[in-house]
Image (cartoon, helix red, strand yellow):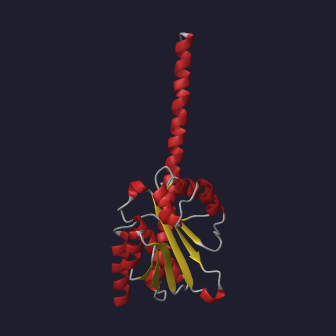
Amino acid sequence: MKQFKALTKSLWRRWTRWIPIRILSEKHRPKIIAHLQSLGAQDRYLRFGYPATDEQIENYVNKLKFERDDIYGVFNRRLDILAMAHLAFSVDPEWSACAEFGVSVDVRLRGRGLGARLFERAMTHARNQGVALMFIHALSENTPMLKIAKKAGARVERDGSESDAYLSLPVADLDSQVNELLEEGMADLDFQIKARAKQFMQILHTLQEVRRGVRDARHQSGI
């Protein structure tokens, strides 16, 4: 009974500040490119560690391994990506229980906790996949990212202009598994609702264009 109450309390605390975070796939590559290329020069520098060009961003996205890593996105009503995160699992057998995290957020939505929520989402999935250590490699001046890591309990080591944050993850439990299951289900539902709404608005716009064309034709013919 105590375990059930603790799980209920955890779920309630999480869902009162819920943000729909959807797992991205191959079909989302164009939207990922559009999001990253919309970042300003400073944001590109902080995200990649260098002032990435449009071509370099496109190369990065084209090399994403969706079958191995997890890429998450937050969509607006037009189904544009406002924020995204990349959870990269180690390909080295000696570090198979490790994963690296990177995130980017649209400048207009800074300060709303999107980066922190993406980090929590990735952290939950990493736990459920048996990852024991999650780390972030970032520029030391990327204070928002390092602040998120520190708040989660990560150990941050600074080496000049660069920093590494290491977060030890607890073993997966019922709470982490149920939370991830609900996150995925609700995010998929949110995306489907937005997709249907966008489709409806496109149909409505087309009908309005047709009506406008018919009305203009009538005026020109004097009917």
Which residue is depicted at the point 55% across and 13% down?
220
Vertical order, 172 against 11 (above or below): below
Which residue is depicted at the point 54% across and 30% down?
209
**Residue 15 is drawn in which quadrant?**
bottom left
Q: Position of residue 82 (x, y in %)?
A: 47, 57
In this view, the residue farthest toward the top is 222
Which residue is depicted at the point 57% across and 58% down?
32
**Residue 54 is drawn in which quadrant?**
bottom right
Q: Position of residue 59 (x, y in %)?
A: 65, 60
Which residue is depicted at the point 41% across and 69% down?
141
Vertical order, 123 against 108 (above or below): below
Q: Evaluate whether residue 17 shows in this view.
A: yes
Quadrant of the snapshot with the N terminus: bottom left
Relative to 66, 149 lies left or right: left
Q: Position of residue 196 (x, y in %)?
A: 52, 51
Q: Evaluate whether residue 84 shows in this view.
A: no
